[in-house]
Amino acid sequence: MYDVSKCAPQEALRHLETAFKRFFTNVKRKAQGVYRGKLGYPRYKAKSKGIGSFHVTGAIHVFDESIQIPRLGRIRVYERGYLPTMAKVLSATISEQAGHWFISLQVEESIAEPCKATGPVLGIDVGVKTLATLSNGTTVANPKALRSNLKKLRRASREHSRKHKGSKNRVKATRKLARLHAHIANIRMDALHKATSQMVMKTKSSDERPAVIVIEDLHVSGMLKNRKLSRAIADVGWAEFRRQITYKAERAGIDVMVVSRWEPSSKTCSWCGWIDADLTLADRIFQCEACGYVADRDANAAVNLALMAAR
C-alpha cells in the first residue's frame, strides 16, 4: 500500500461504503414497494478482473503539457491545451483501456447561464438503418461499428479462446481483442458525439438553435430481447445518444421533451392525423389512406414528434 498514493485505497473503501448504503436503502425501498429494480449485493472483485481505474485526490497540478499526480509525479499528456489550468481541481480518475491510459479531472469553475434558444422545434426519430432522422429532413448515417468489424472480432475471439490460460500468447491475444473492442467503441462514440453536436448546434446563434428537441422514451432493454434485432439495436447506442442530447442541450439552452413510448408517432399521418393501426415494422413507407400523403416512415415519425411539442 506504500507503493501507491493513499487516495487509491481510501477512495476504494468510500466506493464500497456507498455500494453498501445503496444496497440497504434499496432493500428498504423494495419492502415498501417503492423500488422495483434488482437488488445487487456488493461482491468481491479480484484484482485481475478490476475495472482498471483508480481515484486520487489531494495536490493535483495541471500544466500546459503535463499533469502532476500524487506519488506518480509529473506525467506528460497527449492532448495539449485541453485540461483547465486555472480551474480548481477537486479529484482525478485514472483509467486504462486497451493499453491506453486516460485521466478525467473533476474541477470547480463558474459557468455562465446559457442563452435560451429560440429556433424551430426539432423532432428526432432514432432507428437502426439510420442513426437518426430529423424533422427538418436530414438524416444521420449509422456507422454500424460492430457489423463492419464483426468478422475481425470473431477471428480475434477465436484465437483468444484457443490460447492456453496463463501463457504469454494468451496475454497477447487478450490485448489484441481488447484493442479491437476499443476500436469498435470509439467508432460508435465518435459518430454519436458528431451527430449530437450537430443537432444541438452550440456554436450557432440563439435563433438558429432549436428551442425544443423532442425524442421518444424507448424501452431499449425490452427491445433487446428481440433475437433478430438485438445486435443491431445494441450497435446503435440509443441510451448513449439520449444521454448526450440531454446534457448538450442543457448547456446550449435547449429544452428536451421526452414523448411516451406508447405514442403512435410512426403510425400517425403528419398531415391529417389519420392513424394506420395495421402498420408493421417491415413497412418502411407510410401511406395515408385519408389524404394520400406518402413519406418515409422515420421522417413521418420525426415530424409527428416535432408537432407534439406544439400540442
Image: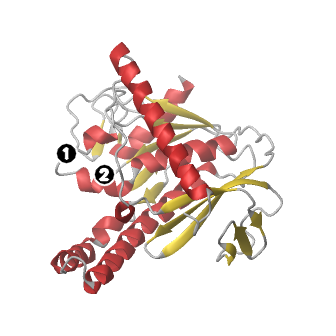
The residue that appears at 54% across and 55% down in the rendered structure is: 9
Residue 285 or residue 77, whichever sits in front: 77
- Secondary element under disc 1, as helix, strand or loop, is loop
Vertical side of 278 occupied by 32: above or below: above
How crowded pointer 1 is (Cα within 10 Å; few <14, some 14-19, many 20+) is rated as: few
Query: Going by the image, does 262 lie left or right of 216?
Result: left
Where disc 2 sits, the SS reads helix
The circle drawn on residue 226 is 1
Q: Are marks 1 and 2 in contact (CB under 8 Å)?
A: yes
Above or below, comparing residue 235 to residue 186 in the picture:
above
- Residue occupying the point 40% across, 32% down: 23
Q: Amino acid at mark 1?
A: Asn
The answer to which quarter of the image holds residue 304 is top left
Q: Residue furthest right?
A: 86
Residue 111, located in which quarter of the rendered image? top right
Q: Nearer the viewer, residue 204 or 269?
A: 204
Q: Is residue 134 visible?
A: no
Q: Give whichever of discs 1 and 2 has the lower sequence position.
A: 1
Left or right: residue 149 versus residue 115 is left
Q: Residue furthest bottom?
A: 169
Q: Which residue appears at 34% of the width and 37% of the height?
A: 41
Label 2 sits on residue: 233
Q: Is residue 16 left or right of residue 280?
A: right
- Quadrant for the N terminus in the image: bottom right
215 w.r.t. 105: above or below:
above
Choose between 234 and 35: the one closer to the eye: 35
225 and 300: which one is in front?
225
Task: Count neighbours of disc 2 (C-alpha within 10 A) and say few if under 14, some if 14 to 19, many if 20 or more.
Answer: some
The quarter of the displayed image where residue 288 is located: top left
Q: Mark number for residue 65? A: none
